Amino acid sequence: MADSAADPAANGSSVETLKGNAQAAYNQIASGPVAQNVKDQSAKTSAEFSNLANSRQTPSQPAATGQPLTHYHSFFSELLSWNNPRASAIAYVTIVSLIFVARYLDVVRYAFKLTWMTLGITVLAEGAGKAILGNGLATQLRPRKYYTVPRETLDSLIGDVHELINFFVIESQRILFAENVSASAVAAVGSFLSYYLVKIVPYWGLALIATTLLFFVPLIYTTNQELIDHYINEASDVVNSQTEQLRQVASRHTSQATEITKQYMGDYTAKAQQMLRGRSASPEAKPKSAPQTSLKDSDFPQAPKEDFKSKEESKGEDEPLIAA
């Protein structure tokens, strides 16, 4: 009897001891460095997400057309700048996970499967409850008032969707009309590479590559900004010097070609004017000068000084007269 009375007391004390040890171990773990580190990281992550949410404000700098930008410009700029590294990392992992889920999981098929299983369970529970208990189980779980979406929530959601659509519309136009030449050049190179990669890389692979570049290129730039800016400035100086030399050479050749063109145009203009004047003016007879010869007066015989006589008169004079 004494042993049987002592056993419950001993069992009770052992249970209490076990509870005390478990509570002490829990307190030790909860107050330990690992738990404290987890709490600190959770608090920092929550603070970064709060900062990211608060960054959704309309930028003060408008577009080139003077139109105000959307608050998603500030949001994505803050997200991709890695000013909140935990929030940016979680966003990247989430997007990559969604890409893999869409690739390897038949989401639509699983959605239909979940739907028919849920409806089948509720129908069976309702039918079995009415048959056995006289009251359906689904009826007992039914809320007193069905949930509805408040108008304020719907208006806020529609406003966010409207701002998000305008973000993509405005950015596509800014890239198309080269408001930022660097961004337009990057988009052109990306489109050129995608044109050839799409032949060998599936669409989900292109989405994964684009997401990785979109998140990690700004991170690499921010961590090595001084070095990258140094090389960019050197490359810019080289390009500017070569451009200036080409500009000078082109200007010199252009001026030479212009001078030659002006010279030829002047010659052709003068010839054309001479031809037009020659055709329009009437010809004038020029006085002809006497031809000059090298003959002298002594080279010719002297002209006779007496008058010419007829033959009869000359015969009469030559024959002697007969004396009568």
Image (cartoon, rainbow, N blue to C red):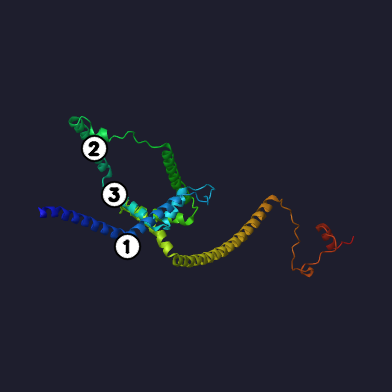
Mark closer to the observer (2, 1): 1
Q: Secondary structure at mark 2?
A: helix
Give the crowd class for mark 2: few <14, some 14-19, many >=20 residues within 10 Å: few
295 relative to 53, above or below: below
Q: Are marks 2 and 3 in contact (CB under 8 Å)?
A: no
Mark before the other along the chain sequence, 3 or 1? 1
Q: Is residue 34 visible?
A: yes
The label on residue 33 is 1
Label 2, label 1: how far apart the Cα atoms are? 47 Å
The label on residue 101 is 3
Q: Quadrant of residue 108?
A: top left
Q: Which residue is mark 2?
A: 116
Give the crowd class for mark 1: few <14, some 14-19, many >=20 residues within 10 Å: few
Q: Is residue 192 visible?
A: no
Q: Amino acid at mark 2?
A: Trp
Give the crowd class for mark 3: few <14, some 14-19, many >=20 residues within 10 Å: few
Q: Secondary structure at mark 1?
A: helix
Q: Amino acid at mark 3?
A: Val
Q: Position of residue 238 (x, y in %)?
A: 49, 67
Question: For the C terminus, which image quadrant?
Answer: bottom right
Q: Secondary structure at mark 3?
A: helix
Q: Position of residue 248 (x, y in %)?
A: 56, 65
Q: Amino acid at mark 1?
A: Pro
Residue closer to the observer: 250 or 141: 141
